[in-house]
Image: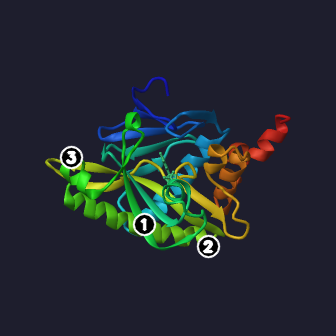
Amino acid sequence: MSRRRQIYEGKAKILYEGPEPGTIIQYFKDDATAFNAQKKGTISGKGVLNNRISEHLFTMLATIGIPTHFIRRLNMREQLVRQVEIVPIEVVVRNVVAGSLAKRFGMEEGTVLPRTILEYYYKDDALGDPLITEEHIAAFGWATQEEMHDIADMAIRVNDFMAGLFAGVGIRLVDFKLEFGRLFDGDFSRIILADEISPDGCRLWDMKSNEKLDKDRFRRDLGGEAEAYQEVARRLGLTPEDEPEVLNLAEHRKTRGR
Ligand code: TMP
């Protein structure tokens, strides 16, 4: 790991130069932040679980024809991905009222939306990722109309697929965030799904109990965040048999006497 050239360190991941040109290694950290990094902490084992969960979701999405940056998982905390130019927009897809939407409009969390809402935020930590419209995106040239068409289209397809996938394991996909990148081929570029999809950037509620199985446990000091991420992995069939010592965090902790 230390032999490789580090390209970028984000809040939850480190990017290293990949083995071949045009590839990147994503290293998943246990670090967790919230409220634009005003709140910081760690969730033990999160990196391993997010690496695995994201691998699974990106692989499944590829089977329905969503182009993604994912190439393959390398080890417990790393995956090889295609190098892209990240579009500086966070795409949030909402099926149920929660979080900032609930706050902005004074709505009750848990209200099912009559239709899926797509929102765009400008990726800029110094500005606190402000909510933007397609007018801002076009005026400031953050993405072309054609790119935005592809992005919106893919976001809806990802939502339809993932909502069904999670419903099948008793989880409600409340909302989630996606990031897209430009994959260059000479002078041409096309939009592909990038970053990660994990409980860090999704709201996942147990369908029966409404228990939160995502980063809101950390944001809201609910506790049990590692167990929640592990439960998501377990329900997706990413069982401890795969990597007993880490995916089975509870056992792991018991043996360490915690
Ligand atoms: P919000 O309700 O706080 O706007 O969040 C909507 C969804 O987007 C939620 O699933 C968490 C995710 N998200 C991120 O992944 N990164 C962020 O910086 C923010 C604000 C939200």
Q: Is residue 71 above or below residue 152?
A: above
Q: Callout 2, which amino acid? A: Gly
Q: Callout 1, which amino acid? A: Ile
Q: Which residue is the site of mark 2?
A: 168
Mark 1 vs mark 2: in front: 1
Q: Which residue is the site of mark 3?
A: 140
Neighbourhood count class around disc 1 (C-alpha, 10 Å): few under 14, some 14–19, many 20 upward = some
Kindly identify which numbered label has been placed on residue 66. none
Neighbourhood count class around disc 3 (C-alpha, 10 Å): few under 14, some 14–19, many 20 upward = few
User: Which of the 4 quarters of the picture holds residue 65?
Assistant: bottom left
| Image location (x, y in percent) of residue 253 | 79, 39
Q: Are circles 1 and 2 on residues that touch, CB within 8 Å?
A: no
State whether label 1 is within 8 Å of ligand 1: no
Viewer-closest of 122 and 79:
122
Drawn side of residue 40 relative to residue 151, left or right: right
- Total number of numbered discs in the rendering: 3
Q: Which residue is the site of mark 1?
A: 117
| Image location (x, y in percent) of residue 93 | 44, 62
Write the residue at 27% across / 49% down. 182
Write the residue at 32% across / 60% down. 151
Viewer-closest of 182 and 119:
119
